[in-house]
Image: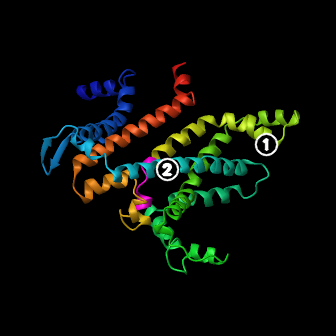
């Protein structure tokens, strides 16, 4: 009984309680992120064969200097840039429309826009693979045939492959980013818009001088997660091409190349090196954009 009282006083102590609440996060961080990351860095300098390992120095990183890796890096970078260019303004405009007082059926449209995010990426990929199929009766070929165009082999040409991937990206994630922006819009005081109305500001002026500046924190957050999601894109491409192989590697991403080396060719060392390079690239890009946006400077103040 005495021991139980001592334990209770220890756990409910004001000095100990914060550490008790933080402990689950600390354990999760070290077990599922810090330890795997450290192991990946270590394996990137090794040749892993089953349970045996052999130190090979920078050999795995030198192996990455090949055309397939550079093409996968170029594909991921291009996908990230274009997806960010699409996934920031379009959800922002949709959120502004839904936040407008003149909009009717707001709850319905919010639900409709968010449903694709709840759909399995496997289901979404299969549906879009059928939509962009090679047959004349596929949905997209039917659409262009209505305008007098010949059927297209969508998933074998670079331009049309990217069209399919960006359509899939917009369909799945526009609703999520729209919710982020909708949350940010609802934090803007209505008094600012009322004052602008009194001063005779137009809708475009209110959007430019009130909405955009006050949505900057939301935009920085959406940009950060979009960069990470774009560089880490794999499942969409894998399902769309029904495997990790695409014609002339047109749909191969960095994570797809990592999967190919690590799981298909069982070369864990090179796969680990790809993971380390990808982590460094994403960290550098996000740190740069956070510095440009002034996030770190504001945090330091």
Residue 122 on the magenta segment: no
Residue 126 picture location, percent across and down = 46, 69
Q: What are the residue bounds of the magenta stretch?
A: 231-238
**Rendered-image quadrant of the N terminus:** top left
**Rendered-image quadrant of the C terminus:** top right
Q: What's the coloring here?
A: rainbow
**Count of all numbered marks drawn on residues in the image:** 2
Left or right: residue 144 compared with residue 6: right
Q: Nearer the viewer, residue 155 or 116?
A: 155
Q: SS class of the residue under badge 2?
A: helix
Q: Residue at x 53, y 72 (%)?
A: 131
Q: Residue at x 34, y 41 (%)?
A: 277
Q: Nearer the viewer, residue 148 or 117?
A: 148
Residue at label 1? 204
Q: Quadrant of residue 186?
A: top right
Q: Is residue 287 above or below residue 50?
A: above
Residue 297 picture location, percent across and down = 54, 23
Instruction: Tell me the mark number nearer the camera, choosing from 1 and 2.
Output: 2
Q: Which mark is residue 102?
A: none
Q: Is residue 276 above or below residue 87?
A: above
């Amino acid at each position: 009984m005495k021991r139980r009282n001592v334990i209770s006083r220890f756990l409910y102590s004001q000095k100990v309680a914060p550490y008790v609440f933080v402990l689950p996060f600390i354990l999760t961080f070290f077990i599922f992120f810090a330890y795997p990351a450290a192991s990946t860095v270590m394996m990137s300098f090794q040749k892993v064969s089953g349970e045996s390992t052999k130190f090979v120095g920078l050999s795995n990183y030198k192996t990455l200097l090949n055309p397939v890796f550079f093409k996968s890096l170029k594909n991921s970078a291009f996908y990230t840039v274009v997806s960010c260019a699409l996934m920031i303004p379009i959800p922002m405009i949709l959120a502004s429309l839904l936040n407008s007082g003149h909009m009717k059926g707001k709850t319905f449209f919010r639900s409709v826009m968010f449903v694709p995010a709840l759909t399995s990426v496997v289901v979404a990929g299969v549906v879009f693979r059928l939509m962009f199929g090679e047959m004349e009766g596929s949905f997209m070929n039917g659409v262009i045939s209505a305008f007098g165009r010949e059927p297209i082999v969508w998933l074998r040409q670079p331009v049309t492959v990217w069209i399919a991937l960006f359509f899939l990206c917009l369909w799945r994630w526009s609703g999520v980013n729209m919710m982020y922006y909708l949350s940010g819009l609802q934090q803007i005081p209505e008094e600012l818009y009322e004052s602008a109305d009194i001063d005779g500001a137009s809708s475009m002026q209110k959007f430019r001088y009130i909405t955009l500046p006050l949505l900057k924190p939301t935009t920085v957050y959406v940009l950060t997660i979009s960069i990470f999601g774009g560089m880490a894109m794999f499942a969409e491409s894998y399902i769309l091409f029904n495997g990790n192989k695409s014609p002339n590697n047109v749909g191969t991403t960095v994570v797809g190349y990592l999967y190919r080396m690590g799981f298909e060719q069982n070369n864990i060392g090179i796969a680990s090196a790809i993971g380390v390079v990808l982590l460094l690239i994403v960290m550098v890009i996000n740190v740069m954009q956070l510095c440009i946006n002034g996030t770190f400077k504001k945090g330091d103040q």
